[in-house]
Amino acid sequence: MRFRLRFVIGTALVAGAIVYLITTAIRNTSEYYLTVNEVAARQGQLVGQPLRVAGRVRPGTIQWDPTTLTLKFAMVEIPDPNANPVVKQVSAADPASYSVTCTGEPKPDMLADNRDVIVEGKLDRSRHITATEVLTSCPSKYKPAQAK
Amino acid sequence: MPDLGRLALAIAFVLAIYSICANVFGARRSRPEFVASARHALWSMCAMVTIAVAALWTGLLSSDFSLEYVASYSSTTLPTAYKITALWGGQQGSLLLWTWLLTIFTSIAAFQSRRRNPEIAPYAMAVLAGVAIFFLGMLNFVTRPFDLLPVIPAQGTDLNPLLQNYWMAIHPPSLYTGYVSSTVPFAFGAAALITGKLDDGWIRSTRRWAIFSWFFLTLGNLFGARWAYEVLGWGGYWAWDPVENAAFMPWLVMTAYLHSVMIQERKDMLKVWNLALIGLAFSLTIFGTFITRSGVISSVHSFTQSGLGPYFLTFLAFIVTAYTGLLIFRARELRSPAEFESYLSREAAFLFNNLMLIGIAFAVFWGTIFPVLSEAVRGVKITVGPPFFNSVAGPLALGLIFLMGVGPLIAWRRTTTSNLVKSFAAPAILGVATGVVAAAAGLREWYVLTAISLAAFVFGTIIVEFRRGVSARRHMLAEPAPKALVNLVAKNNRRYGGYIIHVGVIVAFVGIVGSSFFKTEVKKSVREGQSFSIGAYQLRYLGLDEDDTAHMETATARVEVSRDGRVVAEMTPAKLFYKREQQPATRVAIRSTPVADLYIVLAGLEPNGNQATFEVFLTPLVFWLWAGGLLMALGTVVVMWPNVRERAAIASAVSRAAPIAISGEAAPGGE
């Protein structure tokens, strides 16, 4: 019986260590996952924080310099597909827009005007994101099939 | 054909319902003729689903675009091989494949139970039929593979280019086989709970199923990683994406289960734990399907978001609730008389191995659903990426590797210090020596040093075990060493197959550590004739070849690879453009050696001139990940190999009324 107690304590210690490992890892590695408008709403508190931001490439803003591997573009909120088109027009009068700079990465194949992207990086000053990675999602008109 | 398929699925659904009723009625009233009838119904159900699969394959091969599924996932220009694999290219088809495998496995289990386990088998069959009802219900009422289009298109949308390759042809079926075959041990566990026949009969009857499931989960994960490595073109093989996690969690839990059942077979302990683990393993396969289909968790893999989420969630909630209820209901009967006696015992090593495995599985689960939880609780979506998973799984993996060395050598119940020294002195010295040599060679990361020391330690313990067995046979039976080795493995395949799996794990682990810590990457944009270097390699861009077919456009770069001024290879990474989808894709070039892989991606081509952008990775030791994986598979085959003595043990276990620990025969070794 005495050993049983010691055993329960040992097991609890290991389980506790695992939980501790998980909680500290979460604290150290988590990053916000926001949309462009959500970033705009919290602008002040987010500067310098690691972020993942989902948005849409604003047409005509893509600049790509292959010699320095520098990619620049601007991104805006992804319009809500269910929104009333009239209302959308009104609210789009002053859309939040962020310029993105990503250096040292090849240009993603799928990056094009009006494509949806996820940008990982830091908000360094007003309305500008220095990205470490730009991920493109598949265009919505093509429904990809995934078998897993 | 579509009508035939639809009809077959409807009949299969009815047969599944009938089979549940007949099984339960036959078992409760002791009417074997009803149980036999239910068995025939399960076989007919399997035949019906087979007809449906054949009907869908016929549609795909004949490009019958009146079928919505064929029009969405195939085209006339799609190569024939991929028309066949398009069966699991889309949601309805992959559910059909799942159901087909389920009915096949159910039929085999029904066949095996003809004369075995008369008390629990009918209930296990009823549980299997219940799971089949869910999937057949989905196929009949929710996501139908035989829906027709109002207007027949002239051409189909084609299969997603990322799925048009060899690995995607074999990865989903492997994973599904692993997922679905876990249903059989789950059903027997549930039946044991329902009937109250709680001895280890259900474990022994389904041990082979559990290993079979683990085998295919291992291969499925390995093929998935290989697919990511060869096709996605980012230089890695594992990104802790929710989809990968969904496949990894059942593997972890199944690994824990395979180890902990040995303690129950041997010591009659951990009954609740084993039943909980198999319930968890099965629930995680359903959970995996839920998260990948529901769109609740965003994944870099784009999925067809569909309305299936709520159905899977309801089914999952039902299973977890019902199963937990049964466990609580039987809790008193599941109490074990035996107890742990010492930390220095094999059962303690196995228990902590289980804690680590479940700990990793829990961390993976938590990290996967964290964005959803944080949004629900704090109103803001917070994600955790690969750094989270690595920082949790990394240390726990070290603990697991250590226990992997300890578990098989340490004695059951308790061990004396002198025994410990005797068993572990040589492997421990080997481990420390390896660490010292590595440190002297200039390695500084503590994780890498610990990892290779532990790997050497475990390898040492396995050598000790093989040596011990071989020399015993040589002395007692006067066999020459090679013959003794072969006989040792053949006569104790479960134990020594397990050791082979362990060697595979160690080798794969070394590959993972090497490729994670020492990968180098160069990104460069160059003109024709220009060179750049990575590691000891010089790469020169020679030029571009272009090709254009009805299916796709291809631009292939020729890259000359030299080392120490000598040309060693010409590699040809390519950019593809699939015309029907208007989708670009990449074809990486890999030069694999046991030391390092050279991995070249043609990342970009400038329209204005002869300039190309390359992304090049030099990944040490990644070769050993695949080699280790294959060794694990080989070891599993050895474990599964039919063994006469074990058959006898099963027969006696299932025919015996009271649970008595089995003697030394078919001794569960380290697995």
Image: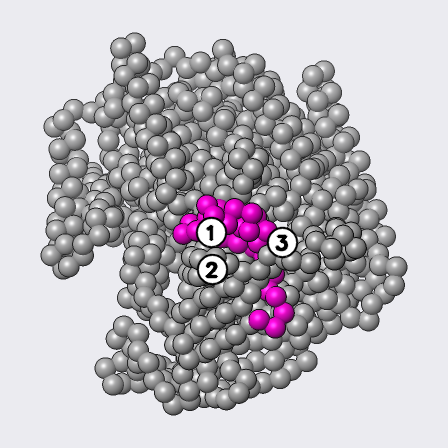
Q: Is residue B500 visible?
A: no
Q: CA distance from mark 2 to mark 3?
A: 28 Å
Q: Quadrant of residue B560?
A: bottom left
Q: Position of residue B90 (x, y in %)?
A: 68, 55
Q: Are marks 2 and 3 on the same chain?
A: no
Q: Earlier in the sequence, mark 2 or mark 1?
A: 1
Q: CA distance from mark 1 to mark 3?
A: 23 Å
Instruction: Using the image, tell me which numbered label, if any, was put on residue B61.
Output: none
* Crowdedness near tag 1: few (<14), some (14–19) or many (≥20) residues, C-alpha within 10 Å: many
Q: Position of residue B71 (x, y in %)?
A: 76, 63
Q: Secondary structure at mark 2?
A: strand
Tell me which amino acid carries mark 2: Ile
Report the mark closest to the observer, 2 or 1: 2
Do callouts 2 and 1 mark residues in contact (Cβ within 8 Å)?
A: yes
Q: How is the image coloured?
A: one colour
Report the mark closest to the observer, 2 or 3: 2
Tell me if residue A36 is in the magenta stretch: yes
* Crowdedness near tag 2: few (<14), some (14–19) or many (≥20) residues, C-alpha within 10 Å: many
Q: Which residues are magenta?
A: A32-61
Question: According to the image, label 1 marks what residue?
Answer: A51
Report the mark closest to the observer, 1 or 3: 1
**In screen coordinates, is B243 left or right of B550?**
left
The quarter of the picture where the N terminus of chain B appears is bottom right
Q: Position of residue B346 (x, y in %)?
A: 29, 28
* Crowdedness near tag 3: few (<14), some (14–19) or many (≥20) residues, C-alpha within 10 Å: many
Q: Residue at x 31, y 85 (%)?
A: B567
Q: Secondary structure at mark 3?
A: loop
Do callouts 2 and 3 mark residues in contact (Cβ within 8 Å)?
A: no
Q: Nearer the viewer, residue A111 or B132?
A: A111
The quarter of the picture where the C terminus of chain B appears is top left
Question: According to the image, label 3 marks what residue?
Answer: B303
**In screen coordinates, is B473 left or right of A49?**
left
